[in-house]
Amino acid sequence: MIMTKQTTIRIPDEIADQAESVARVKGVSINTLIVDSLVHEIDKVRSDKQFVTKAKKLLERDKEIIDRLAK
């Protein structure tokens, strides 16, 4: 079973209207369009070495802070 998480996002009216049109033409729900777009963006940043390096630094810093708080 795939776990899902519900969230609320605010989209400017013009983008929402365009997204609804794209979803209708593709024959998918807005939800599917948004999920597919997020998957595409995540795949894109995974291959971006600069992004990955920055993410690792941020996560290392977060871990250091958590470790200090745990003492």
Image: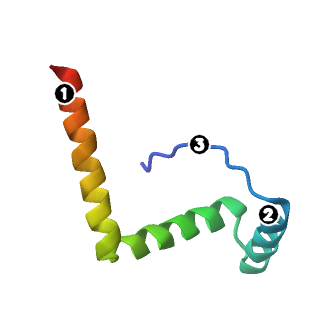
Q: Position of residue 6 (x, y in %)?
A: 59, 42
Quarter residue 71 falls in: top left
Mark 1 is surrounded, within 10 Å at the Cα level, by few (under 14), some (14 to 19) or many (20 or more) other residues, namely: few
Q: Is residue 57 left or right of residue 37?
A: left
Q: What residue appears at the point 84 percent right and 67 percent down from the top-left corner?
A: 14
Q: Nearer the viewer, residue 3 or 65?
A: 65
Q: What residue appears at the point 78 percent right and 67 percent down from the top-left corner?
A: 15
- State how many labels appear: 3
Residue, disc 1: 68
Which three-letter amino acid code belongs to the residue tagged 3?
Gln
Mark 3 is surrounded, within 10 Å at the Cα level, by few (under 14), some (14 to 19) or many (20 or more) other residues, namely: few
Mark 2 is surrounded, within 10 Å at the Cα level, by few (under 14), some (14 to 19) or many (20 or more) other residues, namely: few
Q: Is residue 39 left or right of residue 47?
A: right
Q: Nearer the viewer, residue 61 or 25?
A: 61
Q: Secondary structure at mark 2?
A: helix
Say which label, 3 or 2, has the lower sequence index: 3
Residue, disc 3: 6
Say which label, 2 or 1, has the lower sequence index: 2
Which three-letter amino acid code belongs to the residue tagged 1?
Arg
The answer for how far apart the CA atoms under marks 3 and 2 are is 18 Å
The answer for how far apart the CA atoms under marks 1 and 3 are is 32 Å
Label at residue 54:
none
Q: Secondary structure at mark 3?
A: loop
Give the foreground label among 2 and 1.
1
Q: CB of mark 2 within 8 Å of CB of mark 1? A: no
Give the foreground label among 1 and 3.
1
Residue, disc 2: 16
Q: Position of residue 11 (x, y in %)?
A: 74, 56
Q: Nearer the viewer, residue 25 or 58?
A: 58
